[in-house]
Image (cartoon, helix red, strand yellow):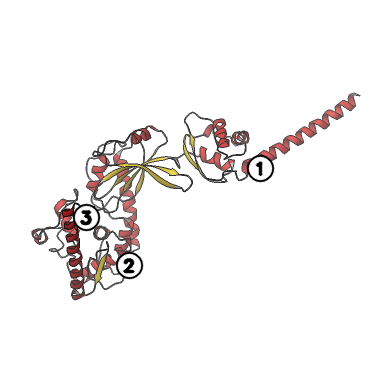
Amino acid sequence: MWRHIASNAVTFLILGLFLLGGVILWGRGQYDAPGPLAQAICLQVERGSNMRAVGNNLAAQEAVSSAMVFRLGAEYEEKTQALKAGSFLIQPESSMKEIVDTVTRGGASTCGTEVVYRIGINQISTQVRELDPATSKYVERVEFTPGVDELPEIYTQTKANADTRYRIAVAEGVTSWQIVEAMKSIDLLDGTVAAVPAEGTLAPDSYEATKGQDRNTILALMQAVQEQRLAEAWEARDPGLPIETPQEMLILASIIEKETGVPEERRQVASVFINRLNQGMRLQTDPTVIYGITKGEGVLGRGLRRSELRAATPFNTYVIDALPPTPIANPGRASLMAAAQPAEEDYVFFVADGTGGHAFAQTLEEHNRNVAAWRVIEAERGAAAAGNASTGGD
């Protein structure tokens, strides 16, 4: 009898172990398999949360098939204590394993709300935007001008959220003075900037920022990025260019940056200046004259006077025979590469064509025709503006 009972017990134990093994294998398969999520979501993990709460949240959003398997899988991988607070983008069909990796990896949030401080040539603005998980694109919620507009309530609320991301976006062609002045107005940052970095040495780009971060730390990063970009452009430069140093390339790139806002024109504009330097012609470019007047501290806000075009200053390229002594703005990567690898064209003239771009010419006769066409466009626009003003506009 006892032998029969023992035999049955062993049988049940083996069966139980077999079933347990099967459950484990099933759970492992569920944990590693593609998940049921049909559309990307932004998963919010609050501070002080745990894997049980996260699993329940995911199950409620139909991102995982089992909250328990999610939690047990995280425990098995010993990642339960590594849970990070933040906002995480969970892609469709993400497995439980992939989601656990995402919420325990650390680093900046990958979705949710972001505040972008935009430093432009004519103004600075602050934008609050939110990632739409379905499209992986940001949707603007509000944009305002600091110091001019009243602080929106949504901005104050967003800054109070621990997982809000911050970026500082610097436009191409902004001067170093403009960047420093703008950063002084960003209430997110800390630290006093003792001196404005040399013109041209700050790389236009988008930079991650954190609350209380020192302004000098971000400026140092901008300088390091620009130094690397300049070195790469100098290394990749075409042979035979009339540019003797990386600094001269930086100066030329800054002029290209200020002369055109059309990306595909940069190399053509570069070819004009390279051809002029090769032929001993003066560059005759208005942005250098303007910089000589403003020193990069804001915009001129008016047209150049004849006296200013004739004035003998180090930045007046209508008077001097070479490049100005320093850059006149902070050029982007594309303008640096345009200076390093200009288009192979014979152009030595260009003028606005009314479309936002320029008309290029090889001869003075052709250039004069282009200038005449531009004058007609200017006159028509002036007449239209005067007509709108007299009728009150639309």
Name the residue: 31% across, 55% down: 332
Name which quarter of the figure residue 287 lies in: bottom left
Amino acid beneath label 1:
Gly
Q: Is residue 80 left or right of residue 124?
A: right
Q: How packed is label 1: few (under 14 Cα within 10 Å), some, or many (20 or more)?
A: few
Helix, strand or loop under label 2? loop
Helix, strand or loop under label 1? helix
Amino acid beneath label 3:
Ile
Label placed on residue 238: 2
- Whole-number angstrom distance, CA of label 3 to CA of label 1: 61 Å
- Whole-number angstrom distance, CA of label 3 to CA of label 2: 23 Å
Label placed on residue 328: 3
Name the residue: 55% across, 31% down: 53
Name which quarter of the figure residue 267 lies in: bottom left
Label placed on residue 126: none
> Is 98 or 197 nearer to us in this picture?
98
User: Which numbered disc, 3 or 1, marks the residue that appears first in the sequence?
Assistant: 1
Percent position of residue 240, x then y: 29, 70
Percent position of residue 94, x then y: 56, 44
User: Which numbered disc, 3 or 2, marks the residue that appears first in the sequence?
Assistant: 2
Percent position of residue 279, x then y: 20, 72
Name the residue: 27% across, 42% down: 145
Identify the residue position indicated by label 1 in the image. 29
User: Seen from this angle, which residue lies furthest right?
Assistant: 1
User: Which numbered disc, 2 or 1, marks the residue that appears first in the sequence?
Assistant: 1
Q: Is residue 376 left or right of residue 54?
A: left
Q: Quadrant of the N terminus?
A: top right
